[in-house]
């Protein structure tokens, strides 16, 4: 028996069965272990029926008088058998998922006052036809006979599932560390207290209390067997109320813990965003400062490129004018003048070509100078601008993150009152000057295709589903392996890891 799984102190009002059993003519009986304890016993109705049959068929019963006498004797024995079942124990054997109703009258139409569960015990108070009047716990009422186990079968149930206990019969009793009056006192039990009986040692009893095991003198305890009793409708209602209260308290505790977890996650995410923003601003400022310190280098290169472009335009115009003069000389009939004019036009064209080449080289040098500045700064130029503000991509992402926590509404496009997945991305982009289609499927058909390994903040990710073009959901990538999206009616607008689902494609509307 697993003592750790049971309480060590039981109420005296529970059903206790005496430890010393006696066998009588009609079944098994037992003596009560105290006024609060009840005995076990039952009459074997089969024995009564068998006696009656023998009397009816026995040789020598030839007259009506003898037959009547035999019947009367059988009736007397049956009455005595019914009387023998009174004040004995019956046990309910039903299985874990069943119970027996205890009723106010011997009828299935009468009110229910309590329930007997599996292995619950009851004292039989009266035998009324097909019903027993029983007392179990705080319940007194009627139970159909066929539902109860009595007699030797009940005694066997007690032996198998009953718990050996001892009841204290004195005002106070010392519990010792060993079975000896000289042993150390380790605990104290009081009058009518019920404790587990570990072992009967004759003059001593080894018992188990809430504080552990010990030994008490057997002269001051009564041995018994414990079986649980019925539960009244009032006790059942109180138990259910207590269980519901405990469940509600558990749910409230879980909800509070979840709310605290969500608040912590939001606080950590907000701190993360603030840190990212601070790092970005510091990086952007560093780039600006570097660019300003190196600006003359890039400015000079671009100035040279601009001058070369102006020179190219000038030589292009000179060449055009010289060719027009050559064409006019060719029509004049002055062959010498025509040759001289064409030679001048050819020279002007050569000068214009040289100027174009110079302009191209100068612009390439200017572009290289700018790129060199950016490379040396270690900054992605697409993410910063020289005025210190974030790029369009960062603006879009920062704007979208403002609405995390707002509700999801199917068919909605409001970032505050509720939007679905494509309504969310459409509204975020629209508020930043970018127009996209309404549904996730339609959005997957526009923009510029992006490789999933090369996605940038502000790009849209699409997922398979039952919508148009086989697309069922869309989210927006915000960087650092995360997306923001209007998820569902339960979660609303949230941030998720980019791999919370596998996207099938990505599109950019910000290039």
Image (spheres, rainbow, N blue to C red):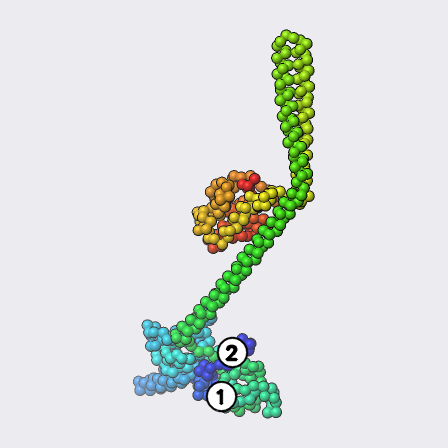
Residue pointed to by mark 1: 191
Which residue, as the protein is rendered here, is positioned at the far left? 64
Q: Residues within 10 Å of mark 2 (few under 14, many from 20)?
A: few
Q: Position of residue 124 (x, y in %)?
A: 40, 81
Where, quadrant-wise, is the N terminus in this rendering?
bottom right
Q: Could you tell me which residue is drawn at 52 percent across and 60 percent down? A: 263
Earlier residue among tags 1 and 2 = 2
| Closer to the camera in the image, 98 or 414 | 414
Which residue, as the protein is rendered here, is positioned at the far top? 333
| Element type where label 1 sits in the image | loop
Q: Position of residue 323 (x, y in %)?
A: 63, 17
Q: Could you tell me which residue is drawn at 55 percent across and 84 percent down? A: 207
273 displayed left or right of 76: right
Q: In whole angstroms, how far apart are the C-alphas of marks 1 and 2?
A: 18 Å
Q: Position of residue 321 (x, y in %)?
A: 62, 18
Q: Could you tell me which residue is drawn at 45 percent across and 85 percent down? A: 37
Q: Which mark is residue 461?
A: none
Q: Could you tell me which residue is drawn at 58 percent across and 51 percent down? A: 277
| Closer to the camera in the image, 378 or 415 | 378
Where, quadrant-wise, is the C terminus in this rendering?
top right
| Closer to the camera in the image, 303 or 262 | 303
The answer to whether residue 210 is visible is yes
Q: Residues within 10 Å of mark 1 (few under 14, many from 20)?
A: some
Q: Is residue 334 above or below residue 479?
A: above
| Element type where label 2 sits in the image | loop
Residue pointed to by mark 2: 7
Q: Position of residue 504 (x, y in %)?
A: 55, 44
């Amino acid at each position: 028996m697993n003592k750790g799984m049971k309480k060590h102190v039981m109420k005296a009002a529970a059903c206790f069965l005496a430890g010393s059993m006696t066998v009588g003519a009609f079944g098994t009986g037992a003596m009560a272990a105290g006024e609060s304890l009840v005995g076990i016993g039952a009459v074997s109705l089969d024995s009564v029926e068998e006696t009656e049959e023998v009397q009816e068929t026995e040789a020598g019963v030839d007259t009506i008088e003898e037959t009547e006498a035999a019947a009367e004797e059988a009736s007397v024995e049956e009455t005595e058998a019914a009387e023998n079942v009174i004040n004995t124990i019956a046990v309910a054997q039903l299985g874990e998922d069943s119970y027996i109703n205890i009723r106010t009258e011997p009828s299935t139409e009468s009110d229910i006052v309590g329930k007997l569960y599996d292995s619950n015990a009851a004292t039989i108070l009266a035998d009324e036809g097909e019903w027993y009047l029983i007392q179990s716990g705080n319940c007194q009422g009627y139970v159909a006979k066929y539902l109860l186990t009595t007699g030797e079968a009940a005694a066997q149930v007690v032996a198998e599932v009953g718990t050996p206990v001892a009841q204290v019969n004195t005002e106070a009793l010392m519990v010792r560390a060993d079975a000896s009056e000289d042993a150390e006192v380790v605990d104290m039990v009081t009058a009518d207290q019920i404790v587990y009986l570990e072992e009967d040692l004759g003059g001593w009893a080894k018992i188990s209390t809430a504080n552990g095991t010990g030994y008490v003198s057997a002269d001051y305890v009564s041995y018994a067997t414990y079986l649980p009793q019925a539960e009244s409708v009032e006790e059942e209602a109180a138990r259910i109320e207590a269980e519901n209260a405990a469940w509600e308290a558990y749910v409230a505790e879980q909800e509070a813990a979840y709310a605290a977890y969500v608040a912590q996650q939001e606080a950590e995410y907000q701190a993360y965003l603030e840190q990212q923003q601070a790092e970005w601003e510091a990086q952007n400022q560093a780039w600006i400062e570097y660019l300003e310190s190196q600006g003359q280098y890039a400015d000079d290169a671009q100035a040279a490129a601009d001058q070369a472009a102006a020179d190219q335009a000038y030589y292009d115009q000179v060449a055009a004018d010289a060719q027009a003069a050559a064409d006019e000389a060719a029509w004049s009939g002055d062959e010498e003048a025509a040759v001289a004019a064409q030679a001048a036009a050819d020279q002007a064209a050569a000068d214009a070509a040289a100027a174009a080449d110079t302009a191209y080289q100068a612009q390439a040098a200017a572009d290289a100078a700018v790129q060199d500045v950016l490379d040396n700064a270690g900054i992605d130029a697409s993410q910063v601008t020289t005025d210190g503000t974030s790029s369009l991509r960062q603006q879009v992402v920062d704007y979208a993150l403002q609405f995390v926590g707002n509700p999801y509404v199917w068919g909605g496009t409001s970032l505050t009152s509720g939007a679905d997945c494509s309504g969310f991305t459409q509204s975020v982009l629209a508020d930043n000057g970018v127009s996209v289609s309404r549904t996730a499927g339609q959005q997957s058909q526009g923009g510029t295709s992006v490789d999933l390994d090369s996605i940038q903040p502000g790009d849209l990710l699409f997922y398979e589903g039952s919508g148009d073009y086989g697309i069922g959901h869309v989210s927006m990538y915000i960087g650092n392996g995360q997306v923001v999206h209007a998820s569902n009616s339960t979660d609303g607008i949230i941030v998720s890891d980019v791999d919370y689902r596998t996207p099938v494609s990505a599109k950019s509307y910000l290039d």
